[in-house]
Structure formats: C-alpha cells, structure tokens
Amino acid sequence: MTTTENLKFIHSQLPAKVKLVAVSKTKSVDQIMEAYQTGQRLFGENKVQELIGKWQQLPKDIEWHYIGHLQSNKVKQIVPFVSFIHGVDSYKLLATINKEAEKCNHVIPVLLEFHIAEEESKFGLSLEEAEQILSMPEIESLKNITISGVMGMATFTDDQNMIKSEFELLQHIFQSLKNRFFSNCEQFREISMGMSDDYPIAVAAGSTIVRIGSKIFGSR
Ligand SMILES: *Cc1c(COP(=O)(O)O)cnc(C)c1O
C-alpha cells in the first residue's frame, strides 16, 4: 500500500471531527510531500533538530505538531513556527513555552500529557499533579499558551481491554479537568490519543486527535 492509499483508508475510518496528525519522524521530505499532495497538512515530529530541518524544506502551510518530550532549553527553537505542542508535563515547561511564545507574539496551543499506561515512564502527569498545576495562581498569567486538552499513550500490549480502559481513563481525566478548571473555556476540547495499532479503540473512547505514523508511512 502506498502512503496515499494508507491515508485514504485511515480517513475513511475516522469520524470527520477527528483530526489526523501524520507522524513523519524518521521519514524523508519526499515521503512527507507524497502525503502533502493528498491534502494532508498536519504532521507530527518528536525531535527538535529533525523538525526544524523539515520545516525549512517543506511548504509553509504545513501545521507542525511537536509530539515528543520537549526540553526547556529547546523550546525557543520551535516556538516561532510550531502549531501545537502535545505532551507538556510540568509547570516549568508551560512557563517556558509561554515566555518564548510571548517573544514572537504567538499563542501556542498545548496539551497536558498524562501517564495512563501500565509501563513505567518518567513522563506524564497524574490527575492530582495536573490539578495542582492548574490551581496555581500563576497559570492565569500565561497569556501566550492555550491549554487545549490532554494527551496520552496506552500500554504497548495486545490486550485490547487494557488499552480501552487506559483510553477511557484519559477521557475521564479530560472530563474532570474540564468540569473543574475549564467549564467556560471552549478551547479546552482536545483528547490526543490513538496511534497506528490502537486508534480505532481511541476513537471509540472519545479521541479528537489521533497521531499515526507507521500505518501511513510504513514501519520505521
Ligand atoms: C511515534 C509516535 C506516534 C506514532 O506511532 P505509530 O505507532 O507509528 O503510529 C504517536 N505518538 C507519539 C508520541 C509518537 O512518538
């Protein structure tokens, strides 16, 4: 199957309101252009240098989603052009993104990353940690970010029920933060979950953004 055929198939499975981020990490500019020619405009990368190189070479109407773990000292390199940052899991990073976005007069949508998988990971918040961050008075002053929702990754497993319950947990976290902190904030509306092997389960659990790489471009 070609990239074009893969994209067509995935779009046929996704409800119209679910956004597809084509995860192009490790893939060439030519492969990205093939997807671009079919109309795909949202692409995801997880390495700062690779993202900068591709942004420089590719059409400027691409919306780049940063989906990796971002170090504070690299924020300023991507903030001038990135459309969306998934996977923010500390106040420090929120504040750094805000500061750099202010310098270039941008407002960057960000998603809070949650640790929903069974696997050990040093990344991702718990609901309690997120509530603590969102309760800080300083949050109000971050005018150059928009906290737009949540992001998470399920355990790498064949156990479909386990994946389903992890995605449902993320949906529950989203709803509880929405009720407590964002009930009047229309922009807090995204749930970024679902990758090549589990996106149908994620969509059934309420995903609004899926991040799909190998099912589009082939294995890495
Ligand atoms: C690589 C990656 C994806 C896409 O993974 P596939 O299994 O190739 O679809 C999605 N999200 C994140 C955060 C990733 O790093």
Image: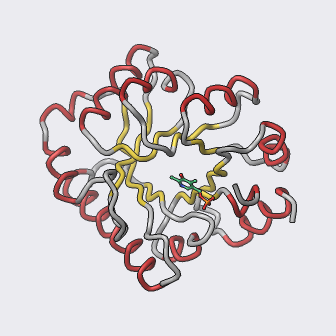
Tell me what residue is drawn at x 77 percent, y 40 percent: 28
- Residue 72: x %, y % from top left: 36, 28
Visual colour scheme: secondary structure
Considering the image in quadrants, where does the N terminus appear? bottom right
- Residue 92: x %, y % from top left: 25, 32
- Residue 30: x %, y % from top left: 84, 39
Horizontal side, residue 72 vs residue 205: left or right: left
Tell me what residue is drawn at x 44 percent, y 59 percent: 191
- Image vertical order of residue 26 relative to residue 103, above or below: below
Residue 201 visible to an observer of this rendering? yes
Quarter for ligand 1?
bottom right
- Image vertical order of residue 112 relative to residue 92, above or below: below
Horizontal side, residue 5 vs residue 174: left or right: right
- Image vertical order of residue 93 relative to residue 181, above or below: above
Quarter residue 135 falls in: top left
Tell me what residue is drawn at x 16 percent, y 57 percent: 128
Considering the image in quadrants, where does the C terminus appear? bottom right
Residue 42 visible to an observer of this rendering? no
- Residue 162: x %, y % from top left: 41, 81
Tell me what residue is drawn at x 46 percent, y 23 percent: 106
Quarter residue 172 falls in: bottom left
Of residues 9 and 51, the one drawn nearer to the viewer in this rendering: 51
- Give the number of callouts: 0
Of residues 136 and 34, the one drawn nearer to the viewer in this rendering: 34
